Image (tube, grey):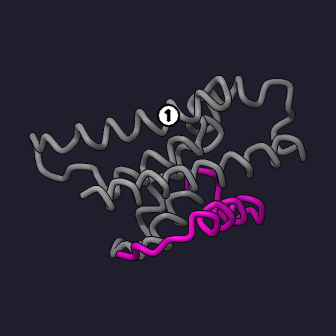
Amino acid sequence: MQKNIDIVKVRDKAADYYRRGDFYCSEAIVKTIKDEFDLPLPDDVIALASGFPVGIGGAGCTCGAVTGGIISLGMFFGRTLPGDPGVSKAMDLARELHDTFKTRHKSTCCRVLTKGMELGSEEHMEQCISFTGEVAEETARIILREIKNK
């Protein structure tokens, strides 16, 4: 795992994946975090994020960038064994990411965040590209802080 991470590069790389249409928000964040931290995980983990864009499969619920960040936190701090109390750490960090985004944008609901925007319009795309980069950066910041404090 790589520990010398440039969080600005993380932000820009995730945003560029979305901007180019390579990946949607949640997928772009998972791919960027996996690659930039050089995690020994198969690219198949990116597929775990494929149902979350546009507020969970287009339903307009939780912002896909937020869910992508939470999936990424789970790659580091989630549990794999039944009953592992370490799940509390993953949940605390997920809540932190959620609350940070909600404080900045007043909502985590895709429907609210994109109200009045046409799906795929320039305004919509620029906002979601920005959210993707922002959440990737914040996720990397949390991961780096927690690794350092370990």
Residue interval drawn in magenta: 1-27
- For image coordinates 54% across by 41% down, the residue present is 66
| Rendered residue at 27%/49% (across/down) | 78
User: Magenta stretch mostly in which secondary structure?
Assistant: helix
Please provide percent x and percent y for residue 6.
56, 70
* Residue that numbered label 1 is attached to: 98
Q: What x and y, as percent, mark residue 8?
A: 64, 64
Name the quadrant containing residue 101.
Answer: top right
Q: Is residue 19 above or below residue 118?
A: below
State which quarter of the image contains the C terminus: bottom left
Q: How many marks?
A: 1
Q: Is residue 5 left or right of residue 14?
A: left
Frontmost residue, 19 versus 120:
19
Residue closest to the eye, 77 or 138: 138
Question: In the picture provided, is 103 more to the left or to the right than 68?
Answer: right
Most extreme residue toward the left is: 83
- The image position of residue 25, as x and y in percent, is 63, 51
The kind of residue tagged 1 is His
The residue positioned 59% from the left and 45% from the top of the image is: 65
Image quadrant in which you'd find residue 86: top left
Q: Is residue 99 above or below residue 68?
A: above
Q: Residues within 10 Å of mark 1 (few under 14, many from 20)?
A: many
Question: Taking 80 as reference, is 109 above or below it?
Answer: above
Classify mark 1: helix, strand or loop.
Answer: helix
Residue at left 63%, top 24%?
107
Farthest residue, direction front = 149
Residue toward you, 17 or 10: 10
Image quadrant where one finds the N terminus: bottom left
Q: Position of residue 10 (x, y in %)?
A: 59, 65
